[in-house]
Amino acid sequence: MAHRLPTKLSLFIIVFLLGVGFGLLWWQFRKLYSTQVQQRGSIMSENILDHPEVLSILFHPRRGVDFTSNGVSVPIEVEPGLSLSAYLHEAGDSAPLILFFHGNGEIAADYATIGPMYAQLGISFLIIDYRGYGMSGGQPTTSNQLTDAVAVFEQLDDILAANNVKPAKIYVMGRSLGSASAIEVAHKNGDQLGGIIIESGFANTFSLISRLGGLDIDADDATMGYGNTAKIEEITIPTLIIHGMEDYLIPASDGQTLHDRSAAADKRIVLVPRAGHNDLMLVGMAPYFNAVNDFVK
């Protein structure tokens, strides 16, 4: 004959086992939550944009070849032993000059045929590679992207003098990710520029990161992002915005926001119909170059 446990003892054992089970579940939950907090805390550290996951979204460096067709090679040292590749397409001794920062998947050599197009318009064109791009040394980060842009500009007089170029005016221009470099230069050195040109530029860093990489970061762009919109609110030099109306990587609304928030009295926007992010110049070559030519002349 089987012996039954007293009812109270049975209930005690059941409650005990349930307690152990819930305890293990709680421990696993706390462990998982702690890991997620640590990972999020890593991204939400003081310099969010230099977190490896963010950098892998923003930068896609390619190496290049130093062909003479790229233009006159003018490597620029941004720190001891580390230089950026740069190429100058000269239009004439006193022609206006555009200092150009390209997109995140491009290199300066990609502009080997575009540089001469500027020169034919009577505009000298100096294009810069980021660290890790083209023939540049180092690895790109958002921090050195901005500091290098300013360092390049601060050496510009010496670079141009070494190549016997004395532009009547200097303009800074940035495409896509390069808009952050151009805006940084204009924000820091606007009084030395004739104007700024922004091609397919972005208004909010974290919206861009979300669109490009699906990583959602809740942070203030002005203090923790590139701060393009906040900076352009303080830039008063002539400003030209060019954007494709069918751009789905960086919507035309970003270009419109930058234009609307610009503090410049002389500000212009050219929205190119049927143009996307990577075919803007191809689809809208005439309005593109007409706008640039009118702006710098």
Image (cartoon, helix red, strand yellow):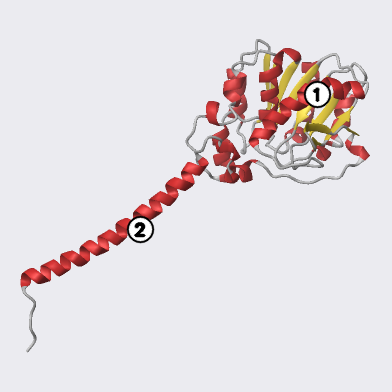
Q: Is residue 25 left or right of residue 161?
A: left
Q: Is residue 55 left or right of residue 123?
A: left
Helix, strand or loop status at disc 2: helix
Query: What residue sits 69% from the left and 45% below the top?
Result: 60
Q: Residue furthest front?
A: 80
Q: Is residue 208 left or right of residue 127?
A: left
The answer to which image quadrant residue 191 occupies is: top right
Q: Is residue 296 visible?
A: yes
Residue 208 image position (x, y, % from top left): 58, 36
Q: Residue furthest bottom?
A: 1
Instruction: Identify the image quadrant of the N terminus.
Output: bottom left
Dot 2 crowding, Cα within 10 Å, few <14, some 14–19, many 20+: few
Residue 128 image position (x, y, % from top left): 79, 33
273 or 224: nearer the viewer: 224
Helix, strand or loop status at disc 1: loop
Dots 2, 1 in contact, CB < 8 A: no
Residue 247 image position (x, y, % from top left): 64, 35
- Type of amino acid under label 2: Gln
96 or 220: nearer the viewer: 220
Residue 65 image position (x, y, % from top left): 86, 45
Instruction: Identify the image quadrant of the C terminus.
Output: top right
Examine the rendered structure and indicate whether residue 263 appears above or below residue 160. above
230 or 19: nearer the viewer: 19
Work out how far the residue at label 2 is from the one at label 1, CA to CA, in angstroms.
56 Å
Q: Is residue 272 visible?
A: no
Count the numbered circles shown.
Answer: 2
Q: Which residue is mark 2?
A: 28
Query: What residue sits 65% from the left and 10% below the top?
Result: 265
Q: Is residue 2 left or right of residue 202?
A: left
Q: Residue furthest top?
A: 265
Q: Which residue is mark 1?
A: 155
